[in-house]
Image (cartoon, helix red, strand yellow):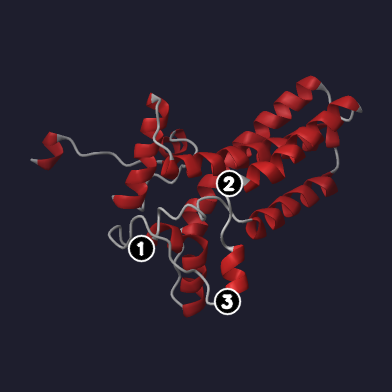
Amino acid sequence: MKNDEYTRHVSGRMFDNAFLEFCSRIHPATPAIVYLPVVVGLMGWGLWTGTTRPLLAVEGFAAGALTWFLMEYAIHRFLFHWEGKGRLAKKFHFIAHGYHHQYPDDPHRLVMPLGASIPLALLIGGGLWLVGKPAVTLPYYCGIVATYLFYDTTHWALHFLKPRTAWGKALRAHHMAHHFACPDRNFGISNRWIDYVMGSVRRRESASDQS
């Protein structure tokens, strides 16, 4: 999508079907209501029952957080920004991410709908359950889910709130540049460091470069 194909401060329609249209809208607090009890409950149960130990819990949680950061980047860059060539591919792109770039200020489409996040959570959780070794995989899973929640909340805040910290202002500028200046750069949302690591950060030209 070209960076000038957007409409500010309005909400558009994603589906012709009324039920699908309803399901595509989500209150920004919904992911926290659904997933925060999952993370707290699983971690509390794992430590209380001795399924995992504190050191393993910290290490596994940190590994899960790093995994989500990599997933966030890969999903955003290679799935959400894959436009394809056929009609179905273009429709998928519009639903998955094109709508958000076209209507970046829609307050009810700034976090992932449950119809998308729950299947992903079940898929990851089921895969880790099959692996076994809950002492490690349980906190690892909690780290993935908790960091996903951080990502979703951060994305909502970057669009809806006015940042008050230097970190928040820098992160918002990073993401707004992705929306309105360089949609092929700045794919990190909850952080900026991953774009530096992956070489996809927007680098402003210096005066010498422009001369």
Instruction: Identify residue for label 3.
Output: 17
Q: Nearer the viewer, mark 1 or mark 2?
A: 1
CA–CA distance in space, label 1 to label 2 = 22 Å
**Residues at marks 3 and 1, CA–CA distance in whole angstroms:** 24 Å
Q: Residues within 10 Å of mark 1 (few under 14, many from 20)?
A: some
Q: Residue furthest top?
A: 55
> Does the rendering let one see residue 200?
no
The numbered dot on residue 22 is: none
- Which of the two labelled residues, at mark 3 and mark 1, occupies the earlier sequence position? 1
Residue farthest toward the bottom in the current orientation of the protein: 87
The disc, 1 or 2, on the residue closer to the chain's N-terminal end is 1
| 10, 82: nearer the viewer | 10
Q: Do we see residue 147 in this rendering?
A: yes
Which residue is labeled 2 in the image?
A: 71
Front in this rendered view, residue 161 or 56: 161
Residue at image location 35% in from the left, 53% down from the top = 183
Does 81 appear above or below 176? below
The amino acid type found where label 2 is placed reads Met
**Looking at the picture, which amino acid does disc 1 mark?**
Met
Residue 148 position by quadrant: top right
Precedes in sequence: disc 2 or disc 3: 3
Split into 4 quadrants, where in the image is the N terminus? bottom left
On the picture, is 51 further left or further right than 87? Answer: right
Q: Position of residue 194 (x, y in %)?
A: 47, 37
**How busy is the neighbourhood of tag 2: few (under 14 within 10 Å), some, or many (20 plus)?**
some
Question: Which labelled disc corresponds to residue 1?
Answer: 1
Residue type (three-letter) at the residue carrying disc 3: Asn
**Residue at x-position 52% and y-position 55%:** 108
Secondary element at tag 3: loop
Quadrant of the rendered image containing residue 48? top right
Q: SS for tag 1?
A: loop
